[in-house]
Image: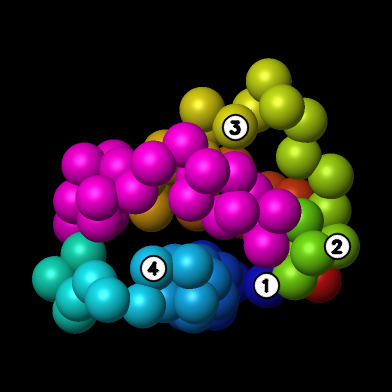
Amino acid sequence: MQRLEIREAIIDILKTINPDEEYDDLKDDVSFRQQLSMDSMDMLDIVLELRKRFKIQIPESDYPKLDSMNSTLDYLAPLLADK
C-alpha cells in the first residue's frame, strides 16, 4: 500500500470520528489533537479504526507515534508495504 492510499484512509477515519472538522487544509506535520480539537478518546478511536481497517496490531507503547499525519504515515507505511 502506498503512502497516498494510507493517507486517504486516515483522512476517512478522521472524518468518521470528527465529522465537523475541515480536512482540506490539514497540516501533515502538526498534531491531530492541536488542529482538530481531539481528545484522548478520539485518539484512541483513531488507533482502533486503524487496527480494524488495516488488520494490524498497534501496541499501546506506539500510540504516541500516531500523533500527526506524517508520524502516522511513517509508522504505517512499513507495516502496510506488502498489502
Q: Where residue 49 sits in the image (x, y, percent)?
A: 68, 62
SS assignment at label 1: loop
Label 2 and label 4: CA atoms lie apart by 22 Å
Disc ID at residue 18: 4
Q: Where residue 52 sits in the image (x, y, percent)?
A: 79, 64
Q: Is residue 75 visible?
A: yes
Asked whether the beta carbons under mark 4 and mark 3 sit within 8 Å of each other, the answer is no
Circle nearer the viewer, 4 or 3: 4
**Position of residue 35 in the picture relative to residue 60 (left or right):** left
Label 1 and label 4: CA atoms lie apart by 25 Å
SS assignment at label 3: helix
Precedes in sequence: disc 3 or disc 2: 2
SS assignment at label 2: loop
- In magenta, the rendered stretch is 27-50
Q: Amino acid at mark 3?
A: Tyr
* Of 10 and 37, the residue lying toward us: 37
| Residue occupying the point 67% across, 59% down | 50
Label 2 and label 1: CA atoms lie apart by 13 Å
Identify residue for label 1: 1
Identify residue for label 2: 55
**Position of residue 59 in the picture relative to residue 47 (left or right):** right
